[in-house]
Image (cartoon, rainbow, N blue to C red):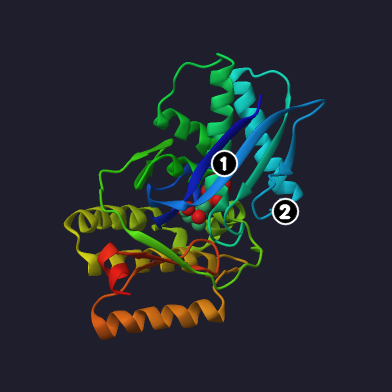
Amino acid sequence: MKIEASAPSNIALIKYMGKSSAQNNMPTNASLSFTLEHLRSFVTLELAHDRDQWAPLEGLPEIKLSDSGQAKFLNHFARLKEQWKIPAHYTVRSANNFPADCGLASSASSFAALTLAVYELAKRMSLTPELGQVELSRLSRLGSGSSCRSLFSPWALWRDDGAEKSAIGWHLDHAVILVSEGKKQVSSSQAHIRVSNSLLYNGRSERAEARLSELTSALQARSWRQCFELCWSEFQDMHALFETSRPAFGYMTSESQRVLAHLRQIWQETDDGPLVTMDAGANIHLLIRPEQSARA
Ligand code: DP6
C-alpha cells in the first residue's frame, strides 16, 4: 500500500517568531498567512523492513535534507504513528516543486503534507475517526509551527494551539523575487530561540497582535496601501529582531536591500504596488491584486 499526500506552502504576513513553549511550538502571538497553492510539497509512505527512514521522492527537484532535517521530519512521523498506534516501519519520501530552505517555507508544506499522509494511512487502517482540519492543524503544529496554517486556504489564522480558516476572502496572486537559492545559515527553529534575547523582543507579541487586528480590518476593507504599510513594518520588525539578537544574525543580502528600495520607490512614485514581505530568508514575496497582474 502506497500513501500519497500533498500540501501547499504559506507566507505569513503577520509572523510567527518567538515561542512560549519551544517543545510544543506554541507561538507568542497569533499569525496570519496567505496559502501558496502553487508551491507544494509531496510525501509518500511505503512499507519498509526494519526501520523508518527518509528518502528523496523521485520525479521532482531532489532535496537534500540534512541529518537534523531528516531527524525532525522522522520525529514528527514517529509522533503521528504513536498518536494513531500505527505499527510497522515505513519509508517516507518527500520533495517540493520549489527550492527548499531558502525562505520559501518548505518546512510548512512538507510537515503539513506529512501530517496528511499519516492521517490517510491511519484512516485506511481504521485507526482514527474522521478528524477536522483544525484538529489536523494542531497535530501538524507539533512538527513545525508554520505548517498548521497550510491546511486552510486562501487565508489562515493561527492563534494558540492550532490554525483555522480566516474570514478574509480576498484572492491575491503571489510571486517571489528569488534573490538567493543558498541554504540558510540559521534555521527558523533556531531563530525562534535566538530572538528572545533581543531588547526589541520586549513588546514584540503586542506589536504583532496590534498589526494583526489592523491588517485584518485593512484586508476586509480592501485598503491596499494600509495593507502594504502593515506588511512592510511587520517583516522589518522580525528582521530587526534577528539583527538585534546577541549574537546578531540576518538573512537580507545587498540584493534583497536593493530590491526592497526599488519596491518602495514604485510605491512612492505610483501610490500603488505589491504587498511585500520576507520570511527567514533573503527572498522577497509579493502579493498582487489580480487586476494588477492583468495590467503587467
Ligand atoms: C519566519 O515553523 O519553521 O517563517 O515551529 O520551529 O518548525 P518551527 O519553526 P517554523 O517558523 C517559521 C517562521 C517564519 C514566520 C512564519 O512563517 O510565520
Q: Amino acid at mark 1?
A: Phe
| Label located before the other in sequence (1 or 2) | 2
For residue 226, which quarter of the picture? bottom left
Residue 248, placed above or below residue 89: below
Residue 212 appears at what percent x and percent y? 30, 54
Q: Is 252 situated left or right of 169 in this image? A: right
Q: Is residue 24 visible?
A: no
Task: Please state which of residues 91 and 228 is positioned toward the viewer in this rendering.
Answer: 91
Secondary structure type for disc 1: helix
Is the CB atom of the residue marked by disc 1 within 8 angstroms of ligand 1's nearest atom? Answer: yes
Residue 43 appears at what percent x and percent y? 61, 39
Q: Is residue 278 visible?
A: yes
Residue 32 appears at what percent x and percent y? 36, 50
The structure residue drawn at horizontal position 32% and vertical position 68%, both measured from the top left corner, is 293
For residue 13, which quarter of the picture? bottom left
Residue 59, placed above or below residue 48: below
Q: Which residue is mark 1?
A: 111
Residue 64's disc number: 2
Residue 200 appears at what percent x and percent y? 45, 64
Quadrant for the C terminus in the image: bottom left
Residue 253, placed above or below residue 30: below
Q: Is 21 situated left or right of 276 in this image? A: right
